[in-house]
Structures are given as C-alpha cells and as structure tokens.
Image: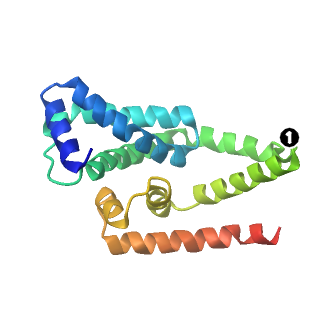
Amino acid sequence: MGEQSDKKLMHEAAKGNRAAFAEVFGKYYPGVLNFFWRLVWDHAKAQELAQDVFLKLWRKRRSYRGTGKFSTYLFQIAKNHWVNHLRRKKRYQQFIDTKKEELKREDWDSVPGPDEEVEEREIEEVVRKAIDSLPESLRVPFILSRYNNFKYKDIAGILKISPRTVEWRMARAFEFLGKKLANLKEN
C-alpha cells in the first residue's frame, strides 16, 4: 500500500467509509504508538496518546487535502498532540517532581534475576535516561529517526523545520548522547 493508496483511503474515510479509515489505522497505528512510547516510556500512556491522534485524524478527515505525504501529515498531528500534552503536563509539574524524587530513592540495583539480565536492564535504563534527558528539540527528531525510521526530509516536514536543521539537531543529539554514555564503555 503506497502513498497514493493512503490518500485514496483518506478520501474514502472523508466520505464516512470506516473500513478505509480502519486500513489507515492498521497501517500507521504501530508507528504512532512507537513514537509516543519512546517519548513517555509508559505503554498505557503511549496507547492513549496514539489513540487520541487517530481520533483527531478521524475528526479532521474531511479537511485532509492530500497535498503532501500522508505519513508527514499524520506525524504532524502526533507532534502537535505531544506539544499540547506537554503544555497540559506543566500543570502537574509539582506532582511529577515528587514522583521523580521517589524514583531516585528506589533501589534499582536490587532487580532479581541472572547477572546478565540485570546488567542488560541497567544499560537499557541508562540509555533510556540519556535519551529522556535530551532537550525536547533534539529528542523528538532523534526518536522519529531512530525508532520510527523517518528520513530527515520527512522529519523536517513533520516538525516544520529545514532538513539541515534536522541534520544539525541529530548531530547535537548524538554528541549529547555520546557524552552521557561515555562512562558506559569504561564500566
């Protein structure tokens, strides 16, 4: 199913064809879910955010014009939804700060299981925290590129920035992560 098929399906969905929309959903939901999973690291929250995006897509189906790549259009909705989510989240910053303090106090080294499994989990946690610590302007393009396999050109379209800016942000993200993860090699 190519780009033209996506556009045809959306035009059918605009007419109220739920089966056409279900095809679009089936094709793109995993990618949108993965995008949010990499941002929130909470499966239930990622599902909620992804479902919200498709609800918005359904509501906006009549305004879809099909002038650009459908995937870019969809991920623009996802990115905008994420930005709105962050704005709402600021209201709960005190609660979040409290939870972060609780997490810092927990003993993560006491995970049961074989040594290798524990070490692998610890490494995954360090990498996850490093990605989470990226500034938002670097983290979103990094996740779109590395976990959703978008090309820089497509990321530029989603974020409404130039491809050169995407390149620059990716370079800064790798530089930042390289510094954060440098001590992994030493341990």
The quadrant in which residue 145 appears is bottom left
Element marked by disc 1 = loop
Q: Is residue 151 above or below residue 83?
A: below
Q: Quadrant of residue 50?
A: top left
How many other residues sit within 10 Å of disc 1, few (<14), some (14-19) or many (≥20)? few
User: Horizontal placement of 104 versus 88: left or right?
Assistant: right
> Residue sitting at 66 percent across and 58 percent down?
127
Q: In this figure, what is the number of numbered marks? A: 1
Residue 162 vertical placement versus 51 (above, below): below
Q: Name the residue under label 1.
A: 113
Q: Is residue 56 visible?
A: no
Counting from the top left corner in percent of width and height, residue 133 is at 60, 59
Instruction: Report whether residue 168 is seen.
Output: yes
Coloring scheme used: rainbow
* Residue shown at 29% from the left, 29% from the top: 22
> Which quadrant, please, contains the C terminus?
bottom right
Residue 142 in percent (x, y) is at 48, 61
- The amino acid on which the numbered mark 1 sits, given as a three-letter code, is Gly
Q: Position of residue 83 (x, y in %)?
A: 40, 48
Residue 124 versus residue 99 in the image, above or below: below
Quadrant in the picture for residue 20: top left
In the image, is 12 to the left or to the right of 34? left
The residue lying at 69 percent from left, 53 percent from top is: 124
Please state, as top left, top right, bottom left or bottom right, where the N terminus lies in the image: top left
Q: Residue furthest front?
A: 1
Q: Where is residue 179 in the image (x, y as percent from the top left)?
A: 66, 73
Please tell me whether residue 51 is drawn above or below residue 176 in the rendered image: above
Give whichever of 94, 18 is nearer the camera. 18
